[in-house]
Amino acid sequence: MPRVMLSQRAWRHRLYLLYLGLKSNPRYKDYAKRIGEMAQGEPDAMFETSLRRLLDYAKGHSTYYAEILSDREFRSIPTLTRDIMRECFDDIRTNPELPNAYMSTSGGSIENPATFVQDAHFEGWSLATQGYYFREFLGVDRGSVKNVWLWASQRDAENIERLGFREKVARFLMNNVWLSTYGADEKRWLECIEVIRRFRPHYVAGYASSLYQMAIIARRHNIRMHRPAFVYSAAESLYNFMRAEIEEQFGAKVYDFYGSREVGAVAGECSRGNRHIFVMNNLVEVLDDCGQVVHDGSEGNLVITCLHNYSFPMIRYEINDVGVMGSGLCTCGSKLPYLARLSGRITDYFVTKSGSLVHGRFVIPLLYFRDWVDDFQVDQLEVNRLRIRVVTRGEVLEDDVQEINTTIRAVMGNGCGVEWEYVDSIDRYPHGKLIFTRCLIAKHLLQCHGRSRGYP
């Protein structure tokens, strides 16, 4: 028989499969196969069996859910908050402990994170779901082509610095270059741009703010970036002005991925701009201010049921994000339901004196497009008081300051006070995320959302 020469991509694909086989979770292929089979069915059938198994297990092995789930319809099950997770940790955790269980915490934008338990079964499903998204929506196996990841987590940055032999082999098999952008200055950004130019990855992935900041640096220095096939944004809210800048500088379409440390892979953006919900892994509901499921396409609070974490069941978990459920089938051809809009966190909203809610995103373009603003954060300290913290680059233009103040008062009310602080740096959250706007008056915010429980 003649010898068949494999292309470099085919060899890389085989190495990627070898990497998956060497991972601590040898059932990855089983999870991936099951997800592929489920995706061929109708959306409701994709999660019904998994949901029933989860509810049965939680009722029989969790003290908290033994009472909560007694004779209730699913839609009437009380939602799970981070406060409840902290107060009832031991009761929620199932007994006996499942194999390969480990402790984890909510991350990113949470100042007072909650602790929970995850295991290899949860991790395998989440990883395989992400793999499904790459194959079916992005047209490539995640690790079978060259890829660069920009990550801003301090913990991850420290881990990169002390990679062992096994981890370095894993990086090679995954075709991966992992660049830490934690605390990056302009010199570091230029170094990262050069790494990408030399490595020439098929795709670039990273925190939304990291991708955007790299694009800004490239524009500032008039650098022509390497053109990947696509850019994968995750971990933070991706605003339209950020998307536009990233796509222009990278010369590639940005796809936004929605997930969290608590529940893993939730939804991924398709070519039509809709974020399809991976109902094989998580069940997503949109609730109104009274806790009822929204059916009319209105904006509401997202609650998520993680279908494959048996160690610490999260059933109807309030993730504190706001979105709009899409209706009908997406024109991309996927059967999966989708979020027509993901508006961000509940605490992205400001509260006016009249009690109405205003999304904090209105203030972001006012600051991001000023040459003298290098970084910023806007906090609502009181109903009639905002604080703007700015890292400056060059001289502050007072005419700009007055223009921003006038626009803010036009939106928030003429009596709104605006305080400016000029600082050396803006602190990131524990996992490296930068939150541009924060409402720090949770009591007023939740009253406007019709909520009765305390906010973490």
Image: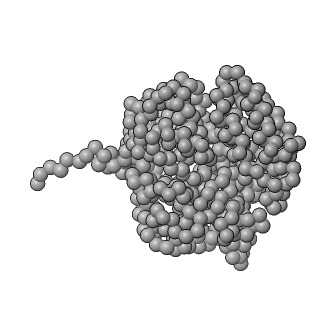
Where does the image place residue 184, in percent across and percent down from the top left? 58, 29
What number of labels is visible?
A: 0
Q: Which residue is the extreme one toward the top?
A: 395
Q: Is residue 341 above or below residue 226?
A: below
Residue at (56, 25) in percent of width and height: 186
Q: Is residue 276 above or below residue 194?
A: below
Position of the N terminus, as image quadrant, is bottom left
Is residue 93 visible to the viewer in this orientation of the structure?
no
Residue at (72, 42) in percent of width and height: 363
Residue closer to the observer: 237 or 251: 251
Q: Judge left or right: residue 227 versus residue 217.
A: left
Residue closer to the observer: 345 or 340: 340
Q: Is residue 225 above or below residue 207?
A: above
Where does the image place residue 393, in percent across and percent down from the top left? 66, 24
Q: How is the image coloured?
A: one colour
Q: Judge left or right: residue 360 versus residue 152.
A: right
Where does the image place residue 370, in percent across and percent down from the top left? 66, 31
Is residue 142 visible to the viewer in this orientation of the structure?
yes
Q: Quadrant of residue 111?
A: top right
Q: Which residue is the extreme one toward the bottom?
A: 71
Residue at (52, 74) in percent of width and height: 45
